[in-house]
Structure formats: C-alpha cells, structure tokens
Image (cartoon, helix red, strand yellow):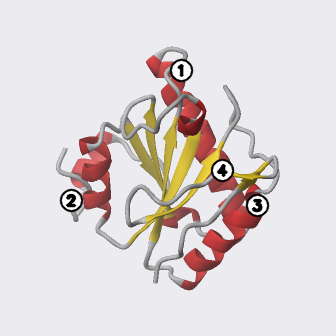
Amino acid sequence: TMLSTVAVLVGGSVAVAEPITGREVAHVQFKFDSSRLLPGTDTALAKVASTARTNPDQRILLSGFTDPIGTAPYNVGLAIRRAKAIEDALTAMGVHEDQIVINAFGEAGPRLAGYAPNRRVTLSLSSQPIATDIDQTFAMGGTSVTWGRPMTTAELEAAPIPVASR
C-alpha cells in the first residue's frame, strides 16, 4: 500500500503539505539554485526507500521543479540535478535504480503558490505501466523522463513493448 505523506523537516519547520495527487508521498524542498539535500531529508527518504524495497513492483517517480527565475533550459537541468540527488540517496539506501524514474518539469507543470514552494522534487509511487507514467508526465507539461540506463530514440522504438505513445 502507499505511504502516507512523509514530512521532510527543513530548518525545524515542516516543508511538506498534503499530497497534490493521491500518488504523491513526499515533497523535498531545495534552496534557491541548489540541488543539495537539506538536513533531515535522509530521514524522510529512508521511509520511502523502505516502502520501495518491500514493493519492488512499484516505481518511485521523482518529479523535479524549479521557480521561474532563470532560463527554461537551465531550470530543466536544475530540476534534473535535484531529482538525481534524491535518486542517489535512495540508491544508497538500497533502492534499485531501475525502480526510479526522473521526470523533469523545471518551471513548467503543476505549480504551487510562490517561488520557494516550487523548488522541490515530489516523490510518487506508481505501479502503472511505464508508458502511462511517461504520457502523464508529458501531458502535465514535463520536458523529459529518464529511468534505468539511457536509451536512444531508435532503442525506444525498437523495444518489444511500447514505452510511450509520443
């Protein structure tokens, strides 16, 4: 079953509110223009890692966001670096990298009020086909999706099972 919302403590205050969707289990906040994990993040990620290890059929979707300050390409890169920092922490806790999907939104996609709340990575659990997760990411304004090993367009198109409808 899904975890309830995990609170990530940042500077003594709760940096996570109720989930935006039913699949979200945590929001990890970041400082301006940073992809460094804040103190207290590992405690919350340990709970997510434990759930992932006991449910290997579920994927963890890491959706990276930024505020609108900076260029769109820079913000997509920052969103990916933030999600990658969380992926690195989760794999260090025993989560297999093939179980983790990184969705980059940058300054696009679902927004929260204000700049600081958008400097985040949301963690969601999914047992849907990967193609469904990818299609949903792009439908919500996502700019890129990565998981497991990098694949070329030709490899994706040659896959025996469709990866995405795009």
Q: Which amino acid does label 3 sit on?
A: Asp
How far from the left and from the top, in percent, is residue 166? Answer: 19, 44
From the image, tell me which residue sits under label 2. Answer: 162
Judge the density around disc 1: few (<14), some (14-19), many (≥20) Cα neighbours within 10 Å: some
Q: Which residue sits at x=22%, y=49%?
A: 157
- Determine the CA span between mark 3 and mark 2: 35 Å
> How much space separates mark 4 and mark 1, taking CA atoms?
24 Å
Q: Which of marks 3 and 4 is nearer the N terminus?
A: 4
Q: What element carries label 1?
A: helix
Which of the two labelled residues, at mark 3 and mark 2, occupies the earlier sequence position? Answer: 3
Q: What element carries label 4?
A: loop
Please give the residue where the numbered disc 1 appears in the rendered image: 74
Identify residue type, mark 1: Tyr
Front position in the image: 90 or 161: 90
- The amino acid type, in three-letter code, at marker 4 is Ala
Residue sitting at x 25%, y 60%: 132
Label 2 Cα crowd, 10 Å radius (few <14 / some 14-19 / many 20+): few
Q: Label for residue 59?
A: none
Give the residue pinned by disc 4. Answer: 15
Residue carrying label 3: 42
N-term-proximal mark, 1 vs 3: 3
* Label 1 vs label 2, nearer the camera: 1
Q: Distance between the residues labelled 2 and 4?
A: 38 Å
- What is the crowding at mark 4: few (fewer than 14 residues within 10 Å), some, or many (at least 20)? some
From the viewer's perspective, tell me whether residue 108 is left or right of residue 54: left
